[in-house]
Image (cartoon, rainbow, N blue to C red):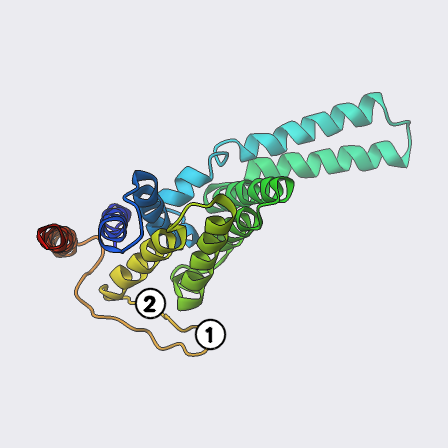
Amino acid sequence: MRGSSHLAIGLITGVAVAALVPGIPFSPAGIALAGFSSLAPDLDHPGSRLSKRLGFAQNYVRWAFVAAAAALALYSHFVLPLGPDRRMGFTAALAFGLIGAAMQGDSTRKLALLFTGLCTVVAGLYTGFVWLSMLGCFVSVAPFTSHRSWTHTLWAAGLWTYIGHLANQSLGWHGVALFAGGGYVSHLLADTLTKAGIKWFMPITDLCLKIPLIRTGSKSGNFLEVAICAGYALLVLGLIIGRMRF
């Protein structure tokens, strides 16, 4: 399913949680969190919306390697004495330069997300927020997994919900786990409606669960995605109106 459809379903899920779950205050931030969470499983995909947004440095990773090569070369030339150390410095600079020049596409994205995730881990350690460090680990590891594998399992959804639970405890923001978990699970349920399906219980079993209604990217598939989003929105709206009446 397309990222825009996942985002729409995640936001609608956030509205449902905010409006229908007793004790959960209506929160635009919570709805946004559900939308964010609905995109998280596709961090394993090079073309996903969240990969592009979180990998904010991916356009600069190559140049960072080139800059590091230039800095190492200058350091070797002006600081290191003649001999093996200087030759080693120039060799390392050449290696960094060649890596930067050769780096393209998905490898750059993965390194950018790794950098983003590690920065988040450090921020969590500095602030004492375990949930933030766990979120950083998820962002760091997910790009290096195969698409629709580990991030598309029940265990990943449980981990994401637990991260939300820890954030709830740290921040005192009631409902974080429900918004996060609801958005994440909405993605898995939506992908279950595609012809490819997902392996909910991997690695216990490689059984692929699917209700093959949607062929992602096809005209009929796009139409069905819009229809599902619209039908889901109407269902949630109906439930909200019904609750307000009673």
Q: Is residue 154 left or right of residue 98?
A: left
Residue 20, x across and y down, in percent: 22, 54
Q: Is residue 239 depicted above or below 64 in this figure? A: below
**Could you tell me which residue is drawn at 33 percent across and 74 percent down?**
208
Q: Point out the image quarter for the N terminus.
A: bottom left
Amino acid on which disc 1 is placed = Pro
Q: Earlier in the sequence, mark 2 or mark 1?
A: 2
Q: Is residue 27 depicted above or below 41 in this figure? A: above
For residue 187, which quarter of the picture? bottom left
Residue 17, x across and y down, in percent: 27, 53
Residue 161, x across and y down, in percent: 42, 58
Judged from the image, the secondary structure of the residue bearing numbered disc 2 is: loop
Circle 1 packing at 10 Å, graded few (<14), some (14-19), many (20+), is: few
Choose between 32 and 112: the one closer to the eye. Answer: 32
Q: Is residue 102 depicted above or below 211 in this figure? A: above
Residue 203 is labelled as 1
Choose between 132 and 137: the one closer to the eye. Answer: 132
Q: Point out the image quarter for the C terminus.
A: bottom left
Residue 167, x across and y down, in percent: 48, 49
Residue 244 is labelled as none
Amino acid on which disc 2 is placed = Ile
Q: Which residue is mark 2?
A: 198
Q: CA distance from mark 2 to mark 1?
A: 12 Å
Judged from the image, the secondary structure of the residue bearing numbered disc 1 is: loop
Choose between 199 and 237: the one closer to the eye. Answer: 237
**Could you tell me which residue is drawn at 59 percent across and 39 percent down?**
123
